[in-house]
């Protein structure tokens, strides 16, 4: 089944169950081509990372930030907000995927949002190096160092050098003055699953995170949940649009830094 | 092969204890003497090692043991040139600590001293003798991931300064009191000076060298240190490989005077992990796993207990072979010079706030 159709069906089911209705027609899409095919009167929701290199979005498009609904990121943010990890002095965020996965720009879009959202800080300058053109499928790797507005620092590493990966290879670590938090188990390199099976049909593993949306992957659940939030609370649309603008600007400054070998200040040009 | 008569001096370097077992057990070595920088260090030595005399003065040791053929000077970085001169004058071979010096004039003098005396001088970058690295080399040589395009590495640890105080003293660690920048009252000589390995490994595994480097320090975890403890480094190699290093002291520790149980506050006190992206694949590697886990005494904290590989054996094998059979160690002063230059470039980048183009 087409991914967008699968997610739309799940979202429709959720809305029906919870009695959420909207005065307008809506759709949930996962690619730029689907976005461009749509009826202009319909509200289009799409993961923001997918449109991270578009100069302007079609009207009535809402860029979603699905990862903010993933439990691990919700909990990391809570650890910061409740000062369990305090103060955060350094973030180390990495995301590795394969050539079929998102572009470097899309991955940077997500990681920049996570850095600012989890820490509650704003990026003030950045320096990046890349291998390949980061805007398209040719981009293989980007590495960078970021300064936040409280002078804490962060590294962001994104890569799509693998032909194919079956599991999530991302990692998000917060280094605080008193403590450390991470979404990966200490002394491991890859994500762990909830269920492992060793049967006559071979080995397999499963990670299920949502009872209501059982059967969807963690990322699919997050996309459906974020669209559900927007339809339940229409006032979120404006906030998401503004956020998208900032994240696109950050991604573009990354490209500029890599091309010019300059530290880029978020308020202006070279730092 | 006749065992090499070896001595260890100073005993204040963080790697000191790691040599004890190899020096005692290697059939290629005969450990004849040691010197300690002070009485406290000497007491510690005698608690750990039996049957090796430990002197308070190097001259006294050298006079009483003219048979010494090689020395491991386990001392503060600032002492290395003086010690190397003394040993080279006597034709004694040297297994240098990982940072010979950050002063490039001193460095070049070391090169001259070694060349003139004809001694073997090997730099202890023990990861070259690590089996995980051996596997990575084999995978790369077998072209499993194609040409390397990105190289990310951590060399993160707790801070050893409470056990080895010179590592927090700019003059002893960096060799001079140099402020990080006009706006930053801290000094060079902290976590970066403790972690040369990643700068060396990328050169070794890519076969390329640094094109430019950008480094940024964060606020200190340990606010009472006058040297940096958190930093990140990025840049490019001449072959286009993009890199990202974390050489921080980002794992918090109990402030013990001597390494031992309960040292860790963060569960894992040391990590060297590599993520290497190629044109046809990716390698992720933990150079020091798998391990064991416990929440034992004295703090009952969940802790990663290391199951160390003994890289020191392969390193000593090479050192002895070079002495007995002739030859140049892989990690010699000439090879290592560019690694030290790259680390200095990090400090220069921190000072200027800009990337540094390497000459």
Image: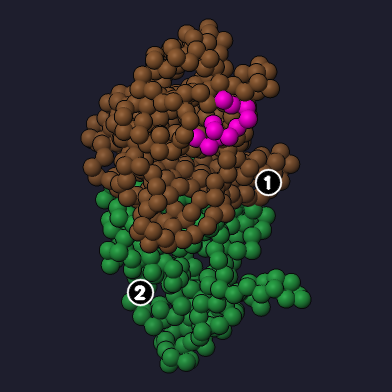
The image quadrant that residue A230 belongs to is bottom left
- The chain to which mark 1 is attached is B
The image quadrant that residue B302 belongs to is bottom left
- Could you tell me which residue is drawn at 66 percent across and 78 percent down? A1
* Residue ID for mark 2: A236
Q: Secondary structure at mark 1?
A: loop
* Residue ID for mark 1: B145
User: Can you give x and y, in whole percent of width and height, for residue A143 in the image?
Assistant: 49, 45
- The chain to which mark 2 is attached is A
Figure chain in brown: B
User: Can you give x and y, in whole percent of width and height, for residue B112 in the image?
Assistant: 49, 10
Q: CA distance from mark 1 to mark 2?
A: 44 Å
Q: Kindly identify which numbered label has been placed on residue B208.
A: none
Up-down relation of residue A88 to residue B331 (above or below): below
User: Can you give x and y, in whole percent of width and height, for residue A123 in the image?
Assistant: 34, 51
Q: Is residue B90 visible?
A: yes
Specify start and end residues of the magenta stretch as a single range.
Answer: B20-30
Up-down relation of residue B342 to residue A235 (above or below): above
- Could you tell me which residue is drawn at 47 percent across and 23 percent down? B33
Q: Is residue A271 visible?
A: no
């Amino acid at each position: 089944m087409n991914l967008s159709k699968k997610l739309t069906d799940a979202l429709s089911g959720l809305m029906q169950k919870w009695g959420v209705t909207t005065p307008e027609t809506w759709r949930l899409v996962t690619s730029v081509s689907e976005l461009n095919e749509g009826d202009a009167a319909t509200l289009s929701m799409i993961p923001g990372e997918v449109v991270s290199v578009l100069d302007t979005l079609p009207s009535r498009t809402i860029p979603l930030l699905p990862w903010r609904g993933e439990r691990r990121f919700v909990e990391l943010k809570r650890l910061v907000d409740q000062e369990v990890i305090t103060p955060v002095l350094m973030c180390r965020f990495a995301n590795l995927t394969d050539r079929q996965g998102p572009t470097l720009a899309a991955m940077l879009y997500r990681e920049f949002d996570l850095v600012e959202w989890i820490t509650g800080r704003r990026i003030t300058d950045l320096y990046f190096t890349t291998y390949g053109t980061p805007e398209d499928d040719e981009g293989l790797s980007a590495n960078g160092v970021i300064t936040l507005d409280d002078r804490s620092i962060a590294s962001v590493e994104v890569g799509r050098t693998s032909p194919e990966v079956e599991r999530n290879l991302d990692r998000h670590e917060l280094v605080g003055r008193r403590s450390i938090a991470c979404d990966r188990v200490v002394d491991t390199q890859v994500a762990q699953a909830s269920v492992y099976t060793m049967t006559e049909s071979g080995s397999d593993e499963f990670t299920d995170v949502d009872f209501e949306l059982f059967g969807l992957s963690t990322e699919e659940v997050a996309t459906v949940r974020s669209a559900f939030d927007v339809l339940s609370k229409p006032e979120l649309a404006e906030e998401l649009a503004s956020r998208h603008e900032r994240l696109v600007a950050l991604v573009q400054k990354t490209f500029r830094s890599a091309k010019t070998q300059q530290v880029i200040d978020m308020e202006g040009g070279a730092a | 092969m006749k065992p090499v008569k070896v001595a260890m001096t100073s005993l204040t370097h963080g790697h000191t204890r790691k040599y004890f077992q190899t020096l005692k057990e290697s059939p290629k070595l005969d450990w004849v003497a040691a010197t300690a920088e002070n009485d406290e260090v000497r007491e510690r030595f005698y608690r750990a090692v039996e049957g090796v005399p430990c002197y308070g003065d190097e001259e006294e040791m050298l006079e009483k043991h003219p048979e010494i053929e090689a020395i491991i000077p386990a001392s503060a970085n600032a002492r290395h040139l003086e010690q190397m001169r003394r040993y080279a004058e006597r034709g004694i071979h040297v297994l240098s600590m990982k940072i010979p010096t950050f002063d490039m004039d001193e460095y070049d003098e070391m090169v001259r001293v070694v060349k003139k005396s004809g001694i073997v001088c090997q730099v202890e970058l023990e990861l070259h003798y690590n089996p995980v690295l051996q596997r990575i080399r084999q995978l790369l040589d077998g072209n499993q991931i194609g040409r390397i395009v990105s190289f990310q590495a951590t060399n993160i640890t707790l801070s050893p300064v409470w056990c080895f105080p010179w590592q927090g003293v700019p003059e002893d660690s960096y060799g001079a009191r140099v402020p990080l920048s006009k706006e930053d009252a801290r000094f060079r000589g902290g976590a970066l000076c403790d972690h040369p390995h990643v700068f060396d490994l990328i050169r070794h595994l890519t076969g390329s060298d640094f094109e430019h480097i950008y480094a940024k320090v964060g606020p200190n975890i340990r606010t009472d240190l006058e040297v940096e403890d958190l930093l990140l480094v990025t840049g490019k190699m001449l072959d286009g490989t993009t890199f990202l290093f974390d050489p921080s002291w980002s794992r918090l520790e109990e402030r013990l005077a001597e390494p031992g149980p309960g040292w860790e506050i963060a569960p894992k006190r040391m990590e060297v992990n590599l993520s290497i992206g190629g044109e046809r694949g990716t390698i992720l590697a933990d150079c020091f796993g798998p391990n064991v886990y416990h929440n034992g005494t004295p703090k009952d904290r969940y802790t990663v207990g290391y199951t160390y590989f003994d890289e020191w054996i392969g390193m000593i094998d090479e050192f002895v072979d070079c002495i007995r059979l002739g030859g140049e160690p892989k990690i010699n002063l000439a090879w290592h010079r560019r690694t030290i230059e790259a680390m200095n470039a990090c400090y220069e980048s921190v000072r200027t706030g800009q990337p540094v183009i390497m000459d």
